[in-house]
Amino acid sequence: MIPVTKPYLPNRKKLEKLLDGIYSRHWLTNNGQLVQELTARLEEYLEVDNLLLVANGTLALQIAYRVLGVSDSSKTGSPEAITTPFSFIATASSLKWDGVKPVFVDIDPLTWCLDPKNIVPGLTANTRAIVPVHVFGNACDVESIGAIAQEHGLKVIYDASHAFGVKYKGESLLKHGDASTLSFHATKLFHTGEGGAIVFKRKEDLERAKKMINFGITGPETIEELGINAKMNELQAAMGLCVLDEVEENLKLRADVWQRYEEALGMYMQLQAKSHGLDYNFAYFPVVFDREEHVVHIAAKLKESGVLARRYFYPSLESLECLGAQVDQPVSRDLASRILCLPIFYSLPDSVQAVIIALIRAELRV
C-alpha cells in the first residue's frame, strides 16, 4: 500500500557514526552535544535566531503559550485565543489542554489560512493571543495579523508545523510573530523521528523557555519556576543532523512530485492559492473536489488501487465536541468536506504517481 507520506530515512552509516559518539559519551539527554550542534545548524539553515529544540511539536506550542503568558492562570478572566478551524487537532487541543479556550474564526477561501478580517469580531476582553497556522506551508497574511495584534495588545504564536524552510518575501517565514513553532514528526520534510522547535522573537523569551523545558531547574539545587520535561534527546538530534545533511535532495525530489501533480491536475481542480512572495517547500499536495461524495468516491478508488490519500484536514475543528461549543465556520467546514491530500514523498515511484493522476483525471472526465 502506498502511504500519503513516508518518513525520509537518511544515510545509515552517518547515523551509526553519530550513535557511536552517543555510546562513547554516555550522554543521552539534557542539552547534549548533538542537540547543541543541531540547534546551531538549524538556526543557520533557517536563517533565524533564538531557536529552541523540544521533544515534539505539540509541546512546542504549549511552551510558547506558557512563556508568552497566554495560559497564565494568575491573570483575571478565563484566557482565550483566536485560532483557525482548518488545522490539525493539536493546534486547538494544545490550547484547550493548557486551559485556554480556542475561539475559531473562519479562513480565507483561497489561501486556506486564517482570514484577518474575521479576527477582530472574535475578540473579547479575555483574548490573549492569535494562533494562526501556515496551512500546508502557505504563508498567513502576517502583516495584517501583526497589525491587529499590536493594536489590541495580543501575542501571536504561529503554528508553522508545515513551514520548515519556507521563505516569505525573501526572509524566513519563521521570523514573524512572537513565536513560531515547528513539528519534526517523522512524516515532515525535516524530522527527528519525533521532535519540534520554537523560534522566539525575543532572546529573553528563549532564555525563560530553556528553564521551562527542564522542570524550571536552573542549577543542581535551584528551581526557579514551574516547568515540564520537554527536552529533545541526543537520539532525536542524531536523526535530525543526518536528515538535515540531505534535506536539499529530499526537497528537490518532493518538488518534482509536486510539479508533476500540478501540471496534470492544476487546470482541472481547485488548488491552494499561494501567498504572494512565497518560496514554498512542497510539503503537501491537496486538491479540492466539487462535493464531498466525490472525495469519498475517489479516496475509495485510490485505496482499491493500493494508494492511501487523506482527507486532511477533516473535520473542521469547530465541529468537535471535545473543544467546546463553537460558532459554525462555513468556509472551513465546506473546504474540509471537499479536500483530499495526495501522496507526496521523496521516493514516490513515477509509475504510481501516473496511476493516481490517471485515476483522478478519469473520474473528472478530462
Image (cartoon, helix red, strand yellow):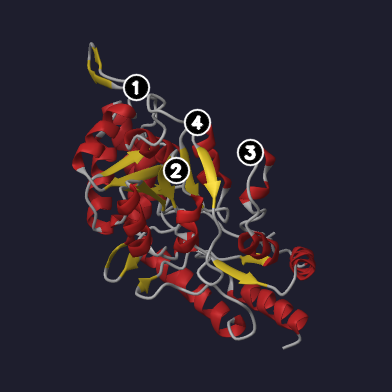
Disc 1 residue type? Phe
How many other residues sit within 10 Å of disc 2, few (<14), some (14-19) or many (≥20)?
Answer: many
Q: Residue placed at 59% from the left, 71% from the top? A: 349
Question: Whole-Å distance between the Cαs marked 4 and 2?
Answer: 18 Å
Q: Are marks 3 and 2 in contact (CB under 8 Å)?
A: no
Q: How many marks?
A: 4
- In primary-sequence order, the first of circles 1 and 4 is 4
User: To which residue does mark 1 refer?
Assistant: 215
SS under mark 3: loop
- In primary-sequence order, the first of circles 4 and 2 is 2
Relative to 10, say whether 117 is above or below. below
User: To which residue does mark 3 refer?
Assistant: 324
Question: Whole-Å distance between the Cαs marked 3 and 4?
Answer: 12 Å
Image coordinates of residue 18 in percent, x first then y, are: 32, 42
- In primary-sequence order, the first of circles 1 and 3 is 1
- In primary-sequence order, the first of circles 1 and 2 is 2
Q: Residue furthest bottom?
A: 366
User: To which residue does mark 2 refer?
Assistant: 57
Closest to the observer, 322 or 359: 322
